[in-house]
Image: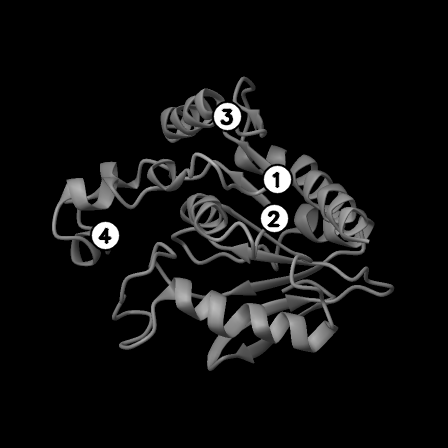
Amino acid sequence: MLPGWSRQQIAGKPADVFDPVGALPFVLLFLHDEAGDTQATSAVFTAALSKHRLRCVAPHAGPSWWVDRISPAFDAAVTPERHLLDGVVPWIEAAWNVGSRGVAVAGIGMGGQGAIRLALRHPERFPVVGSIAGTMDFQERFDKGTPLDSLYPSREHARQDTAVLHVHPHDWPPHIWFACPTTDPRHRGNDRLHEKLAAIGVPHTADLDARGTPDDYITPMVEFLAAALVRESRRLM
C-alpha cells in the first residue's frame, strides 16, 4: 500500500482509503477486479488522485461481481450492492461532509462493469461513472467455474442483469466514461454498451479504438471523473 492510503473498516468490511492533503469535496468510490486489487499499490492511480486532490474509497468484496445478489464469500445477509449503497456511501458522506451527488464510482474489469451497472441503476446517487475494460458481458463467464455460477441460476439470468440491460431510456448518469483496448477480450461487451447508449441518445465518452493495457487508461479516466464532479457541483449551485 502506497503512502496516503490506509486500511479502514466501513460498515463492518475492509476498505482502502486515500485522503490527500487539500482534498476537494468529492470522493471516488472504486470497485476492484476479480483479483481484489484496489489500486492502493498503483503509483499511476495514486498520482492521478493526488493531482486532482480526489479522495478515494476502495471497498473489498472478493469475486462477488458487485451485484445485488447474496454472495456467501462476501456476506451471508447483505449483497455487495446494498453494502455500497447502505454502508459505504453514507460513511463517505458523513466522514467528509460530501454532498449527495459528490460521489463518483469507477472500476476495472469486474469492478468496471459493477460501476457502470450501479450508476445506471442509481443515477441519482452516482452522476459520474467510469470503467476500464469492464466485463460488461459477464454472462460469458457463467458456467466456467466462477462465482457467477452460484449467483445466477442460468446464463440467461446473468445476461438479464448485465449493465447493458439496465440502461434506462429516460434516466441515466449525466457523466459516463468507459474505455477498453481493442485487443482486450472484454472489448465486445464495451462496444455493445456503446451501441446501446448511442441508440437511445445517452451522452457518454467511450474510448474503444486504441491498443494498450488497462493501466494506460487510468490517468484519462481520473481526469474525466474529477472534471465531471466539478461540473456537477457547479450545476447544483
Question: In terms of secondary structure, where does tag 2 sit?
Answer: loop
Q: Which quarter of the figure has residue 68?
A: bottom left
Circle 3/circle 1 CB separation < 8 Å: no
Residue 30 appears left or right of 146: right
Whichever of callouts 3 and 1 sits on the residue coming sooner in the sequence is 1
Instruction: Tell me if residue 198 comes above or below residue 52 in the rendering.
Output: above
Residue 119 appears left or right of 5: left
Q: Which quarter of the figure has residue 5?
A: bottom right
Whichever of callouts 4 and 3 sits on the residue coming sooner in the sequence is 4
- Tell us which disc is closer to us: 4 or 1: 1
User: Residue 29 in the image: x percent, y percent?
Assistant: 58, 58
* C-alpha separation, residue under disc 1 versus residue under disc 2: 6 Å
Q: How many marks?
A: 4
- Could you say which disc has been placed on residue 148 in the image? 4
> Three-letter amino acid code at disc 4?
Leu
* C-alpha separation, residue under disc 3 versus residue under disc 1: 24 Å
